[in-house]
Image (cartoon, rainbow, N blue to C red):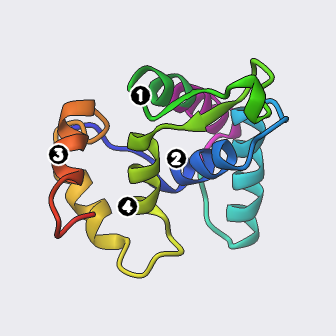
Amino acid sequence: MTTYNWTLIERLLHEVQNGAGEPFAPRQYAEDYAVEMANEAQKLGSLDDLKKLASDYEALLLKQGYIEPRPEDEGGTGENFVLTERGSRLLCMIDSSNPGSEHPIQVLNEQVDPLDPETFDSVAAKPQIA
């Protein structure tokens, strides 16, 4: 089974959502995340590993259709993205500010690869999940 750092993915998706006119910087977002976790006395391991993971997630989210290049008329710079419909559904499911977001994350974690597009679309289509 593939496991994901959902908190980091949530942060990346929020940055995509708010990134008009700004280059997407997953390594910087990972560093900011690490600082926040350190301030909360949570250990994350190697910062370099976390930065690499954020970059890997960027590539995966793009490849699997969760994000796509932001159009120029929406503030696209060639270095930033927008959420696709799939990406918006994922963010809604894992957004920690939403009450009850633990259940969708639990369901995602039960999948062999929850970010596989077919798997995710199937899970997200269930009314008790979305």
Amino acid tagged 2: Ile
Disc 4 marks a residue whose amino acid type is Met
Q: Which mark is residue 111?
A: 3
Instruction: First in sequence, mark 4 or 3: give its number.
Output: 4
Which residue appears at 75% of the width and 17% of the height? 78
Q: Find the distance from the CA under tag 4 to the CA under tag 2.
A: 12 Å
Q: CA distance from mark 1 to mark 4?
A: 16 Å
Distance CA(mark 1)–CA(mark 3): 18 Å
Is disc 2 placed on a helix, strand or loop? Answer: helix
Q: Name the residue that disc number 4 marks.
A: 93
Give the position of the C terminus as an image quadrant. Answer: bottom left
Q: Earlier in the sequence, mark 1 or mark 3?
A: 1
Please name the residue that numbered disc 1 is placed on.
65
Q: Which residues are magenta?
A: 45-57
Q: Which mark is residue 9?
A: 2
Q: Please identify, in this view, whether the residue under mark 2 or under mark 1 is nearer the observer.
A: 1
